[in-house]
Every structure is written in structure tokens, then in C-alpha cells.
Amino acid sequence: MELVFRARRAITAAGTGPCSVGVEGGRIVAVEPGAALSGDRVVELGEDVVLMPGLVDTHVHVNDPGRTEWEGFETATRAAAAGGVTTIVDMPLNSLPPTVDPDALEVKRKTAAGRVHVDVGFWGGAIPGNSGHLAALHEAGVFGFKCFLLHSGVDEFPPLDDAELEADLRILAELGALMIVHAEDAPTIDAAPQPHGPRYAGFLASRPREAENRAIARVIELARRTGARAHILHLSSSDALPMIAAARAEGVALTVETCPHYLSFTAEEIRDGATQFKCCPPIREAGNRELLWQGLADGVIDCVVSDHSPCTPELKRLDSGDFGAAWGGIAGLQVGLPAVWSGAAQRGHGLADVVRWMATRPAELAGMTRKGRIAPGYDADFCVFAPDEEFVVDVAKLRHRNPVSAYDGSPLRGVVRQTWLRGQEVTGDDPRGELLNRGQC
């Protein structure tokens, strides 16, 4: 074979153990126990590392073009590769123009072409007035459509009201397409105390759990009524887990994600003025965090993705620490795997669980049939991970554009030693990533 990986520990579709993985033409062609395979080139992995499938992160804000001072395709995909992520799907907002029609998608593709270090797909956007573009965007290869139920933070990507959401869900049901939803209820948040100043408790009170719960209940009802597939983004309120489980039990086509920061941090630990922790929905209390972990263990939450949403240091208002004025978003694409593994190991979960949450299930969510597993026919995308090595996050060494992250100073367990994309090691020097279309990966 062209290339063979021999691993003393590997997490494959067949289970966990020593194996050899054969690669030809960038695809996995054989997975055999032990050292059964030989090849023109053999990569022998040490006893301290685990061969895992490359992670799939379906929630990344690259912000390119238009807000490249926040992030960009080169920096975001370097950070992804450094974190063992071999495939990302870019969100349709915060770039200019937003990805709400085929022309905007083409602008984004041209901007990304030749500049990506991992494979990149794109979500389309669903906003008021663009219903007529949804079918064309679907045909052009987006992986689904994102909408908001309240102000998105940028005026060019407005929210859908209930009637618009139902109408779009009916279109997507006919297309067999997925709607992914930022589910927070605007009236509930409008009635809550408005955030201002440096108190994290004040910001938390401004985004109550009830806002998520009410919005998720509406999404469930409209998905039930239309028969469309719906996905809840960045679940933060554990209160919603019972209604999600009940909806799925009755056959509603609903999936759910959460994010590493909701599994890692707690409201009680966030000091006043630490606006690097601001995100929407917010990081909640310790008891809520443990229930999210239980939701993962129970399978109610399907996957864990980063919601990497960086900005410039100025927009985080680190000088004033004003949670009301600061941009909401966590920059954590590179450290998601060690963050989740650190928490998972403490709670008795294994690396196979982490692979399911961060590689296999996100790939399935996006309809990618060649990503997220080590199995014949899949792309030879690998993360070589040292699960027992510990480190402290230094934001200056992270590879996203701006040195701001809630993870700065966090002690974490697990280090990504190498990342391989279609059988080639990703070094960050030569961008070999591809732009992906739905149904072709």
C-alpha cells in the first residue's frame, strides 16, 4: 500500500485496540488488527498516542470575507488542524456578505479557495426574504441552513419570526435539508434585566434558561408540524433536555449539540469583568454543566462542536470588562478536544465517547459519508493524540487570529501530536484543504 499507519491504540469503526490502517489515494482501504499491513511508507506510532479519526467541527465562524480582522480562512483552518480537526463547516453570518444566496456562497468559495489547511464546507442562511434562494443554495451544495430566533448580533442577518420559520421549514422538508437554529426567545430576553457593567451574574440574568426553553419548545412544535429536520445549536440550558428527549421519542426529527465551553466552565468560576467568557447563550451554573454531561452520556445531546466565534480584543471590551458592550463569542477551536477529554476522563468516559461526540456524530449530522470514522472507504483524516500529556493553555500560542480565549491559563489533559488530511500531514505551511459540497463527501 502507499501508506500504512501502525498504532498500538486506535479508535476505529470496529472498536478500540492495536491495528494497521492502509491508505491509498487519500482514502482508507484497509483496517486490520495488529501490524498486519505493510506499505511503501509506514508510520509507526508510539505507545503514548492514540490514532483517532480527524474531528469534524460543524460550528465555526470564520468571518471571511468582510470581517477578516476577527478571523480568516488561513488562521481558522490552521487552528483547526492544530486541534486535530480535519473538517469544519463555516457559519453563514459575520462574513460580508452573509451566505444567504448563491452569489454570496460563490464569493465565500472564491475567498477560501487555496487558503484552507483542512476541508471546509458551508452552511447557508435563512433570513426574512430569502426563502426563494433556499432551493438554489441547497443545489449549490450547502450542508443546511442556519436561522436565528432573535437578533443575531449583526444587522445583516436578521431573525425569523414563527411564520417565517414554519414556511422555511416546509421548504426544507421538501428538499430533505436541515435547519439549524440559534434557539433563544426574544421576548423573554427583552423582558429580562439588561446587561451592563462587569458583573457576570448580571449578564447571566439577562439570558435566562427560560429563553432557551421556550425557543426550543417552538422549534420542536414546528418541526413536528412540518416534518422537517431541525437541529438545536449550542445547547446551554439543561432544563430543555427532558422535552428534547420526549420529542425524539415521539419521532420528531431533532438533533442537538453543545459546546466545550459549556462542559468546561461554570458561572460560579467566572470573575467579574472577564468578558472573554461572554457567549450567547451563556455559560451557566455547575449543576447545569453536570446535567449537560449526563445528556451526552444518555444520548440526548448528539455532538460537541466548538462554536468558535472570535473577534478583535477591542470588541471584547477587556479594558472596561463591560458584559453589556462586549462581543459574545468563545474562541476555542484549537483546544476543544483536550477540553472535552479533560472533562470526559474525570467523569469516567473514554476516548471512544469523545470520538463519537466530536467526529462521528457531527459528520453524520452534516451528511458526510467519508468523514468521522476510521473505516475502509473513508478519507484518511487522522488525529494523533497523546491523551495523558498535560499542558496549560497559552493564548499567545494558539493559531487563531487574535490572542483572546476563555481557555487561556486552563490546565488541560491531552495533546494533539499530528493531524493528517487525506493521508498527508498538515503542517500549517501548505494549504491542501478542499472546499466541500453536500453529498460529495
Image (tube, rainbow, N blue to C red):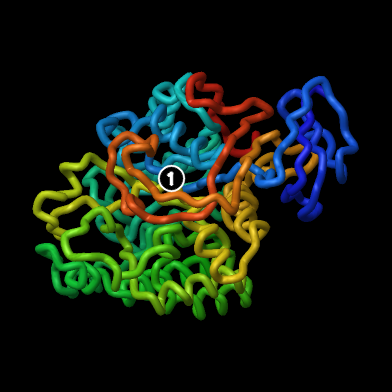
> In the image, 361: left or right of 267?
right
Percent x, y of residue 158? 27, 50
**Residue at the disc numbered 1:** 333
> In the image, 33: left or right of 434?
right
Given residues 145 and 232, the one toward you in this image is 232
**Residue under the image location 39 percent in, 35 percent down:** 399
Given residues 349 and 132, the one toward you in this image is 349
Which amino acid, mark 1? Answer: Leu
Q: Quadrant of residue 149?
A: bottom left
Percent x, y of residue 353? 64, 61
Given residues 185 and 117, the one toward you in this image is 117
**Residue under the image location 33 percent in, 56 percent down:** 160
Percent x, y of residue 228? 55, 60
Q: Is residue 332 above or below residue 441?
A: below
Residue 216 is at least partly visible in this image: yes
Q: Residues within 10 Å of mark 1 (few under 14, many from 20)?
A: many
> In the image, 23: left or right of 274?
right
Q: Is residue 351 above or below residue 84?
A: below
Image quadrant containing the N terminus: top right
Q: Quadrant of residue 379?
A: top right
